[in-house]
Image (spheres, helix red, strand yellow):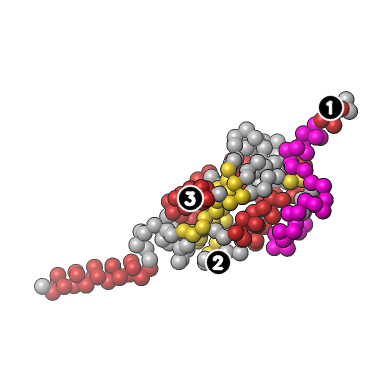
Amino acid sequence: MAPMIRAVAVCFVALCGLRATGTSGAAATTEAAGDALYLLLNLARNGKLPVRIETLKKSESLVSTVTSALPSLVGDDQCANAGSITVQTAEGFFVSYTGQSPNYADLIQTALTAGLQKLAAYPSDKWGSGSWSTDKEVGLLGYLLWHDSTEVGCVASKCAAGTNVTLCRFKPTAASGQFPFSEEYYNGLKARTTSLADLTADDLDTSSGVTVPSVLFGGLVAMLALASV
Protein backbone atom coordinates (compact mmCIF):
# COMPACT_ATOMS: atom_id res chain seq x y z
CA MET A 1 0.00 0.00 0.00
CA ALA A 2 2.83 2.39 0.83
CA PRO A 3 4.14 2.60 -2.77
CA MET A 4 0.61 3.25 -4.03
CA ILE A 5 0.04 6.00 -1.46
CA ARG A 6 3.32 7.63 -2.46
CA ALA A 7 2.36 7.46 -6.13
CA VAL A 8 -0.99 9.08 -5.44
CA ALA A 9 0.75 11.79 -3.40
CA VAL A 10 3.19 12.51 -6.24
CA CYS A 11 0.36 12.83 -8.75
CA PHE A 12 -1.56 15.13 -6.41
CA VAL A 13 1.45 17.40 -5.95
CA ALA A 14 2.05 17.51 -9.70
CA LEU A 15 -1.58 18.40 -10.34
CA CYS A 16 -1.48 21.16 -7.75
CA GLY A 17 1.69 22.48 -9.34
CA LEU A 18 0.01 22.72 -12.71
CA ARG A 19 -2.91 24.62 -11.22
CA ALA A 20 -0.62 26.92 -9.27
CA THR A 21 1.34 27.95 -12.33
CA GLY A 22 -1.75 28.22 -14.52
CA THR A 23 -0.42 25.90 -17.22
CA SER A 24 -3.73 24.11 -17.55
CA GLY A 25 -3.82 24.32 -21.31
CA ALA A 26 -7.02 26.37 -21.16
CA ALA A 27 -7.62 28.81 -23.98
CA ALA A 28 -6.67 32.43 -23.46
CA THR A 29 -9.48 34.81 -22.61
CA THR A 30 -9.97 38.05 -24.54
CA GLU A 31 -11.56 41.45 -24.19
CA ALA A 32 -12.75 43.90 -26.82
CA ALA A 33 -10.67 47.08 -26.87
CA GLY A 34 -12.18 50.34 -25.65
CA ASP A 35 -12.90 53.50 -27.61
CA ALA A 36 -9.61 55.13 -26.61
CA LEU A 37 -7.68 52.72 -28.83
CA TYR A 38 -9.83 53.52 -31.86
CA LEU A 39 -9.16 57.23 -31.40
CA LEU A 40 -5.42 56.54 -31.23
CA LEU A 41 -5.55 54.52 -34.44
CA ASN A 42 -7.16 57.45 -36.24
CA LEU A 43 -4.68 59.89 -34.73
CA ALA A 44 -1.85 57.68 -35.95
CA ARG A 45 -3.34 57.73 -39.44
CA ASN A 46 -4.43 61.35 -39.73
CA GLY A 47 -3.44 63.48 -36.75
CA LYS A 48 -1.74 66.73 -37.81
CA LEU A 49 -1.04 65.47 -41.33
CA PRO A 50 -1.31 67.60 -44.48
CA VAL A 51 -2.41 64.62 -46.58
CA ARG A 52 -4.91 62.23 -45.08
CA ILE A 53 -6.28 58.74 -45.57
CA GLU A 54 -9.63 57.20 -44.64
CA THR A 55 -11.02 57.51 -41.11
CA LEU A 56 -11.60 54.23 -39.29
CA LYS A 57 -14.85 53.22 -37.64
CA LYS A 58 -15.26 50.36 -35.18
CA SER A 59 -16.77 47.24 -36.73
CA GLU A 60 -18.51 44.77 -34.42
CA SER A 61 -18.17 42.16 -37.14
CA LEU A 62 -14.39 42.56 -37.16
CA VAL A 63 -14.33 42.53 -33.35
CA SER A 64 -16.12 39.17 -33.49
CA THR A 65 -13.65 37.86 -36.07
CA VAL A 66 -10.62 38.88 -34.02
CA THR A 67 -12.19 37.51 -30.83
CA SER A 68 -12.39 34.12 -32.53
CA ALA A 69 -8.88 34.28 -34.01
CA LEU A 70 -6.80 35.67 -31.15
CA PRO A 71 -6.87 32.71 -28.69
CA SER A 72 -5.36 30.34 -31.24
CA LEU A 73 -2.65 32.89 -32.07
CA VAL A 74 -1.50 33.52 -28.50
CA GLY A 75 -1.89 29.91 -27.34
CA ASP A 76 -3.02 28.90 -23.86
CA ASP A 77 -4.06 31.02 -20.88
CA GLN A 78 -0.39 31.97 -20.41
CA CYS A 79 -0.20 33.37 -23.97
CA ALA A 80 2.67 30.93 -24.57
CA ASN A 81 2.73 31.58 -28.33
CA ALA A 82 2.48 35.37 -28.21
CA GLY A 83 6.12 35.78 -29.18
CA SER A 84 5.64 33.67 -32.30
CA ILE A 85 2.97 35.84 -33.91
CA THR A 86 4.02 37.33 -37.24
CA VAL A 87 2.46 39.94 -39.49
CA GLN A 88 1.45 37.12 -41.82
CA THR A 89 -0.31 35.07 -39.14
CA ALA A 90 -1.87 38.11 -37.48
CA GLU A 91 -3.28 39.46 -40.76
CA GLY A 92 -3.41 42.88 -39.15
CA PHE A 93 -1.73 45.33 -36.80
CA PHE A 94 -0.74 44.10 -33.35
CA VAL A 95 1.19 45.20 -30.28
CA SER A 96 2.69 43.04 -27.52
CA TYR A 97 3.16 44.00 -23.87
CA THR A 98 3.38 42.62 -20.34
CA GLY A 99 0.53 43.04 -17.87
CA GLN A 100 -3.07 43.92 -18.70
CA SER A 101 -2.94 47.72 -18.79
CA PRO A 102 -1.17 48.61 -22.04
CA ASN A 103 -0.14 52.17 -22.85
CA TYR A 104 -1.49 52.15 -26.39
CA ALA A 105 -0.22 55.63 -27.22
CA ASP A 106 3.36 54.57 -26.53
CA LEU A 107 2.96 51.14 -28.17
CA ILE A 108 1.51 52.53 -31.39
CA GLN A 109 4.05 55.37 -31.46
CA THR A 110 6.84 52.82 -31.09
CA ALA A 111 5.42 50.83 -34.00
CA LEU A 112 5.16 53.97 -36.15
CA THR A 113 8.70 55.04 -35.36
CA ALA A 114 10.15 51.59 -35.98
CA GLY A 115 8.35 51.20 -39.29
CA LEU A 116 9.36 54.62 -40.58
CA GLN A 117 12.97 54.05 -39.53
CA LYS A 118 13.01 50.93 -41.69
CA LEU A 119 11.51 52.91 -44.59
CA ALA A 120 14.31 55.40 -45.06
CA ALA A 121 12.73 56.38 -48.39
CA TYR A 122 9.37 55.79 -50.03
CA PRO A 123 9.44 52.16 -51.20
CA SER A 124 9.19 51.14 -54.84
CA ASP A 125 7.75 47.74 -53.89
CA LYS A 126 4.02 47.16 -53.65
CA TRP A 127 2.30 45.10 -50.97
CA GLY A 128 3.23 41.44 -51.13
CA SER A 129 6.84 42.04 -52.15
CA GLY A 130 10.01 43.61 -50.78
CA SER A 131 10.13 44.78 -47.19
CA TRP A 132 6.34 44.78 -46.90
CA SER A 133 6.43 40.98 -46.81
CA THR A 134 9.78 40.36 -45.11
CA ASP A 135 10.05 42.99 -42.37
CA LYS A 136 7.77 42.90 -39.31
CA GLU A 137 7.98 46.62 -38.54
CA VAL A 138 7.27 47.62 -42.13
CA GLY A 139 4.42 45.13 -42.44
CA LEU A 140 2.76 46.44 -39.27
CA LEU A 141 3.07 49.97 -40.61
CA GLY A 142 1.37 48.91 -43.83
CA TYR A 143 -1.62 47.39 -42.04
CA LEU A 144 -2.00 50.32 -39.66
CA LEU A 145 -1.84 52.96 -42.40
CA TRP A 146 -3.55 51.17 -45.29
CA HIS A 147 -5.02 54.08 -47.23
CA ASP A 148 -8.56 52.87 -47.92
CA SER A 149 -9.32 50.95 -44.72
CA THR A 150 -12.57 52.30 -43.25
CA GLU A 151 -13.42 49.68 -40.60
CA VAL A 152 -11.43 48.15 -37.77
CA GLY A 153 -11.93 45.73 -34.90
CA CYS A 154 -9.50 45.33 -31.99
CA VAL A 155 -9.32 42.70 -29.25
CA ALA A 156 -6.82 42.15 -26.40
CA SER A 157 -5.73 38.89 -24.78
CA LYS A 158 -6.08 38.77 -21.00
CA CYS A 159 -3.39 36.36 -19.84
CA ALA A 160 -2.48 36.65 -16.16
CA ALA A 161 1.17 35.96 -16.94
CA GLY A 162 3.39 36.14 -20.00
CA THR A 163 3.06 38.53 -22.92
CA ASN A 164 -0.35 39.86 -23.92
CA VAL A 165 -1.30 40.92 -27.43
CA THR A 166 -3.83 43.36 -28.85
CA LEU A 167 -4.74 42.63 -32.46
CA CYS A 168 -6.59 44.90 -34.89
CA ARG A 169 -7.89 43.81 -38.27
CA PHE A 170 -9.12 46.13 -40.98
CA LYS A 171 -11.57 46.30 -43.87
CA PRO A 172 -10.67 46.82 -46.63
CA THR A 173 -7.38 45.29 -45.65
CA ALA A 174 -3.95 45.13 -47.24
CA ALA A 175 -4.09 43.81 -50.80
CA SER A 176 -1.31 42.43 -52.95
CA GLY A 177 -0.08 44.65 -55.76
CA GLN A 178 -1.06 47.96 -54.14
CA PHE A 179 0.84 50.64 -52.27
CA PRO A 180 -0.33 51.00 -48.65
CA PHE A 181 -0.17 54.79 -48.95
CA SER A 182 1.06 57.50 -51.31
CA GLU A 183 4.48 59.14 -51.33
CA GLU A 184 2.90 62.46 -50.34
CA TYR A 185 1.33 60.84 -47.30
CA TYR A 186 4.64 59.16 -46.44
CA ASN A 187 6.44 62.52 -46.57
CA GLY A 188 3.87 63.99 -44.19
CA LEU A 189 4.38 61.11 -41.76
CA LYS A 190 8.14 61.55 -41.81
CA ALA A 191 7.78 65.27 -41.14
CA ARG A 192 5.32 64.91 -38.25
CA THR A 193 7.07 65.61 -34.95
CA THR A 194 4.14 65.47 -32.52
CA SER A 195 3.89 62.15 -30.68
CA LEU A 196 0.61 60.28 -30.35
CA ALA A 197 0.54 60.97 -26.61
CA ASP A 198 0.37 64.70 -27.39
CA LEU A 199 -2.32 64.47 -30.08
CA THR A 200 -6.02 64.94 -29.32
CA ALA A 201 -9.28 64.51 -31.21
CA ASP A 202 -9.01 68.18 -32.23
CA ASP A 203 -6.00 67.22 -34.34
CA LEU A 204 -8.32 65.26 -36.61
CA ASP A 205 -10.31 68.41 -37.41
CA THR A 206 -9.92 69.36 -41.06
CA SER A 207 -11.57 72.77 -40.76
CA SER A 208 -8.38 74.51 -39.65
CA GLY A 209 -6.47 73.70 -42.79
CA VAL A 210 -6.74 72.27 -46.26
CA THR A 211 -6.31 68.52 -46.34
CA VAL A 212 -7.09 66.06 -49.09
CA PRO A 213 -7.15 62.27 -49.15
CA SER A 214 -3.86 60.60 -50.05
CA VAL A 215 -5.15 58.90 -53.19
CA LEU A 216 -6.88 62.06 -54.45
CA PHE A 217 -3.73 64.09 -53.83
CA GLY A 218 -1.72 61.66 -55.94
CA GLY A 219 -4.28 61.97 -58.73
CA LEU A 220 -4.11 65.76 -58.68
CA VAL A 221 -0.32 65.65 -58.92
CA ALA A 222 -0.55 63.36 -61.94
CA MET A 223 -3.09 65.66 -63.63
CA LEU A 224 -0.91 68.71 -63.08
CA ALA A 225 2.08 66.86 -64.50
CA LEU A 226 0.13 66.02 -67.67
CA ALA A 227 -1.12 69.59 -67.97
CA SER A 228 2.43 70.91 -67.93
CA VAL A 229 3.55 68.71 -70.82
Q: Nearer the viewer, residue 123 or 76?
A: 76
- Residue at x 63% of width, y 43% of height: 149
Residue extending farthest right: 228
Q: Position of residue 116 (x, y in %)?
A: 70, 49
* Of callouts 1 and 3, the N-terminal one: 3
Task: Identify the disc placed on residue 101.
Answer: 2
From which residue to which does the magenta span run?
Answer: 193-222
The residue lying at 63 percent from left, 45 percent from top is: 150
Q: Which residue is mark 1?
A: 226
In this rendering, the answer to whether 91 lies above or below 48 is: above
As drawn, the residue found furthest toward the front would be 207
Q: Which residue matches tag 3?
A: 64
User: Does the magenta run of residues contain 46?
Assistant: no
Q: Amino acid at mark 2?
A: Ser
Q: Secondary structure at mark 2?
A: loop
Quarter occupied by the C terminus: top right
Q: CA distance from mark 2 to mark 1?
A: 52 Å
| Image spot of residue 77 (x, y percent) | 41, 61
Residue neighbourhood size for the residue with mark 1, other residues' Cα within 10 Å, grouped as few (<14), some (14–19), many (≥20)? few
Q: Amino acid at mark 3?
A: Ser
